[in-house]
Amino acid sequence: MSEEREAAPQFILLKKIKKIKNMFLKSKINSQLAIIILIVLTAGAVFLIRDSYNSANQEIDLLNQDQVIISAQLIRDAAKESVLYRINEGNGKIISSFLGISQNSNVFSILEVLSKKEGFKIETKEYKDMGVLVESIDGIKNGTDNKYWQYWVNGELPMVAADKQGVKGGDEVEWKFEITNF
């Protein structure tokens, strides 16, 4: 009987150790299962976020392409209703701008608009029968270094005063300060 009493506490102790061991194994299994579930959930979240990110990027790319196409069309439409105007002062300084036009626009009226926009002065002399002669642009006067102001429309030198030369959408007007052949 004393052996049974001694065996009983050992048996109880072994039983308790087995129980603790089983709990530890279960908790270890539960921990491993929790880690696996956490990894699966994280991977799923990463996949969903990446998929949403890719979809958003694709939409942004499409919007940017549409915007570029629209912008190019706006530029073409604006060019049809405006004039590219350049003033080449002959010293490396070039003033360039797209300017809107109206039905009555001419080379001189557009020059006046540009002078107000860019903040430079124009000096002119009006000849009753011939029209307006531009004598100075941005402080640079005709005759300086034997150079004079001349204008071209679409690469051609017109033979009329600037206020007599009409312009239409898409034209390119350029004033140059250079030595003339006249």
Image (cartoon, helix red, strand yellow):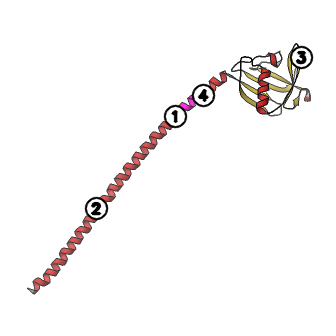
Separation of marks 1 and 3 at Cα, in angstroms = 55 Å
Q: Residue at x 82, y 26 (%)?
A: 176
Q: Quadrant of residue 111?
A: top right
Three-letter code, disc 1: Leu
Tell me which label, 1 or 2, sits earlier in the chain. 2
Q: Which residues are magenta?
A: 65-71
Q: Which residue is mark 3?
A: 127
Three-letter code, disc 3: Tyr
- Side (left or right) of 67 relative to 40: right
Q: Which residue is mark 1?
A: 63
Q: Magenta segment, principal secondary structure?
A: helix
Separation of marks 4 and 3 at Cα, in angstroms = 43 Å
Q: Which residue is mark 4?
A: 72
Disc 1 element: helix
Q: Which residue is mark 2?
A: 30
Tell me which label, 4 or 3, sits earlier in the chain. 4
Three-letter code, disc 2: Asn
Label 4 crowd (10 A; few <14 / some 14-19 / many >=20) = few
Separation of marks 2 and 3 at Cα, in angstroms = 102 Å
Label 3 crowd (10 A; few <14 / some 14-19 / many >=20) = few
Disc 3 element: strand
